[in-house]
Image: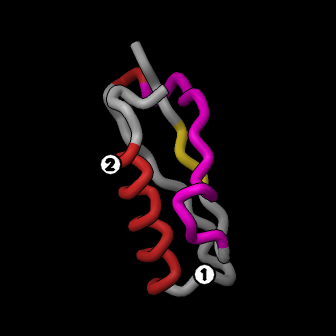
Amino acid sequence: MATAKLTIQRGKVDLKDVILTAGSAEAQSDTMSLNIDTTNLSKGEAMMLLDELKQKIFSSPWPLL
């Protein structure tokens, strides 16, 4: 089963900044999770980062990896 992990950092909002690596065992259970450090992140910034993750999924071959 293919699993994938998408990672993007605050302040890096270009598609090239989204890192795609192998997913964890959690992903093998048909689960998608999202971890957000909201310490210095506004809601607007979080939404921008989510948009970049969405664009990475749209532009990558499927299944990921």
Describe residue 34's horizontal placement relative to residue 62 as left or right. right
Question: Horizontal and vertical percent for residue 33?
Answer: 43, 46
Give amino acid for label 1.
Answer: Leu
Residue indicated by mark 2:
58
- Whole-angstrom CA distance, mark 1 to mark 2, is 24 Å
Check if residue 46 falls in the magenta segment: no
Residue indicated by mark 1:
41
Q: At 60% across and 34% down in the image, what residue appears?
A: 21
Snapshot quadrant of residue 28: top left
Taking depth in this image into account, of 60 and 11 the one nearest to the observer is 60
For this orientation, the residue located farthest to the top is 1
Describe residue 37's horizontal placement relative to residue 57 as left or right. right
**Neighbourhood count class around disc 1 (C-alpha, 10 Å): few under 14, some 14–19, many 20 upward:** few
Q: At 35% across and 26% down in the image, what residue appears?
A: 63
Q: Element at badge 1?
A: loop
Check if residue 24 falls in the magenta segment: yes
Which contiguous range is marked in magenta? Answer: 12-27
Q: At 56% across and 66% down in the image, what residue appears?
A: 14
Question: Horizontal and vertical percent for residue 17?
Answer: 63, 58
